[in-house]
């Protein structure tokens, strides 16, 4: 069985490889100023969720499009505002469509990535995810949200490296 550190490095490399342009973009990096859950910024959260998506995808051994998985996950909360001072309770219902619009404005988004971003708030947003990449994002997002509320983000060391 492979060591945990090797597994995490492979996840980090996958996220860094497919998401390089997003990770280095000015607007994505600005999301580090906005808190998402607990002490985690939106940037921390987005990278942590992406790492977990890759981990879950590798764990299942199913056929995933890692390019799409990484990019859709990195951009799933690309709403670009501090939600605590913006639309309050309505944020949960509205931000997926805002994130999709912003992502489509700033990056080239394929239909699967669009579905991942648009449907990641299922079941709060009632339309379910359509593709397996979108299903895995939906799960990873909730797991990471709980973890961040009470502790450091999942894969916090890889998150720190990917923010450099
Ligand atoms: Fe979200
Ligand atoms: Fe999220």
Image: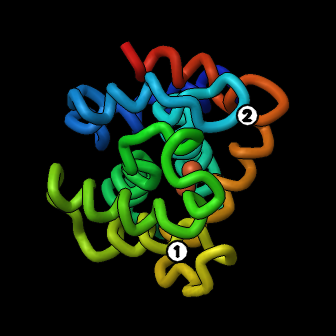
| Residue at 39 percent of width and 68 percent of height | 97
Q: Which corner quadrant holds the C terminus?
A: top left
Neighbours of disc 2 within 10 Å: few (<14), some (14-19), many (20+): many
Mark 1 CB lies closer than 8 A to ligand 2: no
Query: Residue under circle 1?
Result: 132
Q: Quadrant of ligand 1?
A: bottom right
On residue 148, which mark appears? 2
Residue 125, percent across and down? Answer: 59, 77
Q: Is residue 8 visible?
A: yes
Q: Which corner quadrant holds the N terminus?
A: top right
95 in relation to 36, above or below: below
Q: Pick the residue in front: 112 or 77.
A: 77
| Residue at 46 percent of width and 50 percent of height | 77
Q: Is residue 76 left or right of residue 26?
A: right
| Residue at 20 percent of width and 35 percent of height | 21
Q: Is residue 65 left or right of residue 35?
A: left
| Cα gap from disc 1 to disc 2, whole angstroms | 24 Å
């Amino acid at each position: 069985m492979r060591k945990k550190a090797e597994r995490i490095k492979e996840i980090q490399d996958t996220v860094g490889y497919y998401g390089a342009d997003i990770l280095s973009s000015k607007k994505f990096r600005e999301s580090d100023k906005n808190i998402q859950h607990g002490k985690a910024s939106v940037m921390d959260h987005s990278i942590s969720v992406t790492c977990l998506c890759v981990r879950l995808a590798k764990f299942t051994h199913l056929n995933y499009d890692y390019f799409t998985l990484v990019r859709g996950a990195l951009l799933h909360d690309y709403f670009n505002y501090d939600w605590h001072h913006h639309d309050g309770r309505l944020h949960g219902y509205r931000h997926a469509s805002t994130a999709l619009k912003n992502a489509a404005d700033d990056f080239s988004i394929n239909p699967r990535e669009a579905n991942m971003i648009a449907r990641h708030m299922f079941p709060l947003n009632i339309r379910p995810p359509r593709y397996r990449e979108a299903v895995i994002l939906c799960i990873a997002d909730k797991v990471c949200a709980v973890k961040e509320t009470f502790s450091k983000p999942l894969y916090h060391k890889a998150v720190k490296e990917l923010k450099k």
